[in-house]
Amino acid sequence: MNARAELPFDTCIQEALSLSGGWMARWVSQLGAALSQQEVLTPTSQGKRGQAQARAALAACSDRLAPRWSTTFTDAVRADIAREGRAAPGSRQPAQRMLSLQELELMDHGQVQTSVELARLHQVIKLAVDDDLIALTALLSAAQGLRSVRPEANPLRPEVVVDSLTTALVQLNVDDASRQRWFHAGAVALGQALKGFYGGLIQRLEQQGVQPAGFVVVPVIAARGPASTHRGAPNVASEADGQPLVLTLDHLHQLLVGNLAHSGSGVSDQGTSGSGNAMVRTLAGEVVAQMLRSIADDRRLLEPVRELVLQLKPALLHLAKTDPRFFADRNNPARRLLEVITARGLAFSTEQDTGFGEFALQVQLTVQSLQTPSPGLPERFAERLRRLASFGPPEDGAAMETLVRVEQRNLLAERIASEIRARPDFVRAPALVRRFLVGPWAQVIAHARLHVEVLGESPLLAELPAEQDAPAQRYMDILADLLWSCQLSQASLNRPRLIRVVPLVLRTLREGLDAIDFPRAQAESIFHMLMGLHEAAYKTQRSEDFLNSSLRHPSDAPHEPWLHGSEASASGFIDTQLIEPDFLDTVPMGAELQVAETLSVGAWVELLQNQQMQRCQLRWASPHRTMFLFATAEGRPVSLTRRGMDRMTTLGRLRVVAEQGVVDEALAAVARLAWVNSGKLG
């Protein structure tokens, strides 16, 4: 048995998987009893028939359900462990999966009802296992060597259990109606089964001496504040009858598909709150109210911006009467206007920030023009969107083009470095020479090759002298003499060759480094190192101190993408290799947070530069995600490499403000509220 299999984590997972079939079989038996009981208690004949059908469906597959569920659970757990093992250290895993408005709109009524029962199932299980889940996750995190608790490090969490159950039911072709009744009848029993399952695993881990990992509070920019106290804060009462409306997934779905009366694609207006356009207006108003409440409580936006957004409430409610699904359409001018205001509002952390006054004035003018509801309101939204979109920093296409060129050159340099490493004489060279060749010199050759490719697109290339397309080849050809001259045992035996090749080698190296605008100070240190080696070879001396110093640096360490001085200036490049940690003895919490792996275009971050924290939006990521271009509120470009972003995050110099748009988050909060409400009322 290997050492890995003896770790407490692996032992616990193996035992958990071996135990799963037993408690799953017991749950299937309990489910059958629960269905029989509900059939007796159901008052209507139609309900009794439904319960009987669900019980019959269970009987038809009861001998296969537990084994199939155990298999899908095993597969899901192993896949989760493998996914976690492949994930970048510190990369963030998504929270519990919930429906989006777009997904909800595409569902039919049966699928929505299944989602409602799933929501209730999650709620019931959470209430039953919450304390045990926290304890088990802390122990499993520690068993994997983590110093702090990571919820995604627990592959036995309830979401995995429920998802594997759903997968098993799909594989067994269980119909939606039966699934809904099974989820409803078996929720409490499943919660209790999981509680006992977790409790047994906790006891075994504690008996093995595993101590729980600690909980770490990571400083973030809070999105939500206390309950809103803004003037004009949205009221969540129903407009139809003055009673509070509890928004559910079923309500949202009916609103999105426009079929509240269940009588075809059209909606009627009978003046009642239960069907037709009256209910459409009520639900649309509720969604708008919840969306605005979420934005009003978002402390990442400055108070004046939130107040101005709230002043749009009358116009948005009026629009909801004629276009009740505007918020679900990403191309709707009203939604896009909200997105533009909130996205640009994220650029400012204080009212004193450059450009905030002008931005606030433009938004105020926009809000004032929409204050009076009228039949032409949709057209006015579109007009104000065009005006507001024209205000603000332009896209910096030049910076993007620069970084595209940088990534192309660096990817080519990586391939060239591999070619150089494959040379048989490479491994015999001193470490500093090897590091120079696979770093700066690979960049020199890549630059020369790309230059030839660009010229190759022009008919003028045929008119150029032959020697003008030769640098890339000359830079490769010089490697044989350079590597030979740096091997003291070989070069010292042939002084005439050494005297002949050294001037050509040094002249070619200087030419190449000048071509990429390599910093003069760094170039001189390279030449000093080479001349020391050549002098030692010429004098037949082996300077042990010099050689030992050259071997301290590993030659295979990763290189940061190289930018010319003009490229760095054009793209606002931050060279994080020059940044020293503020506290050298500080150990990062757990693993480094690799933000570059997950951050999407449009996200906002705060980064510390020149002793000043500023907000920037990610405008562009290179195709291979090695270069990232941000823009400040005034449009100044800021660029970072992938490793640079992660380094700044680890040093506390970069933190994420918003990974997606404020409006997207607000609508996600509406869907989440409907999900929770559905679970409570199911």
Image (cartoon, rainbow, N blue to C red):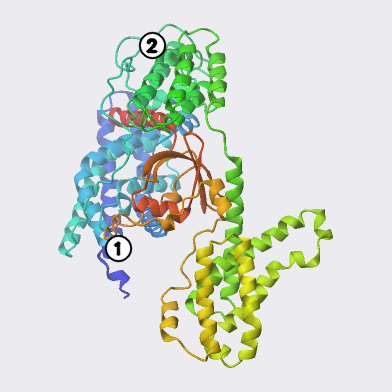
Write the residue at 52% across / 51% down: 627
Counting residues from the start of the chain, the first of labels 2 and 1 encountered is: 1
Residue annotated with mark 2: 273
Which amino acid type is marked by label 2?
Ser
Horizontal side, residue 287 vs residue 124: left or right:
right
Q: Report x, y in % for residue 375.
A: 53, 8
The label shown at residue 224 is none
Which residue is more in the foreground, 193 or 671?
Answer: 671
Spatial CA distance of label 2 from label 1 is: 55 Å
Apparent side of residue 92 relative to residue 149 in the rendered image (left or right): right
**Position above or below: 667 against 204:** above
Q: Quadrant of the C terminus?
A: top left
**Is 598 displayed left or right of 421 in the figure?**
left
Disc 2 on helix, strand or loop? loop
Circle on res. 14: 1
- Residue density around tag 1, few if under 14, some if 14–19, many if 20 or more, within 10 Å: few
**In the picture shown, does residue 656 fall above or below 564?**
above
Which of 505/338 is in front? 505
Tell me if mark 2 has few (under 14), some (14-19) or many (20+) residues whose alpha carbon lies within 10 angstroms of its own: some
| Residue ID at (65%, 87%) | 497
Looking at the image, residue 95 sits to the left or right of residue 107; the answer is: left
Q: Is residue 621 above or below residue 205?
A: above
> Residue 171 location in percent, x, y?
45, 48
Q: Amino acid type of disc 1?
A: Gln
Answer whether residue 491 is visible to the viewer in this image: yes
**Quarter-wise, where is residue 512 in the image?**
bottom right
- Residues 479 and 114: in front is 479
Where residue 520 sits: x, y (%)? 54, 63
Count of numbered circles in the view: 2
Out of 392 and 342, give the one closest to the viewer.
Answer: 392
Circles 2 and 1: CB distance less than 8 Å?
no
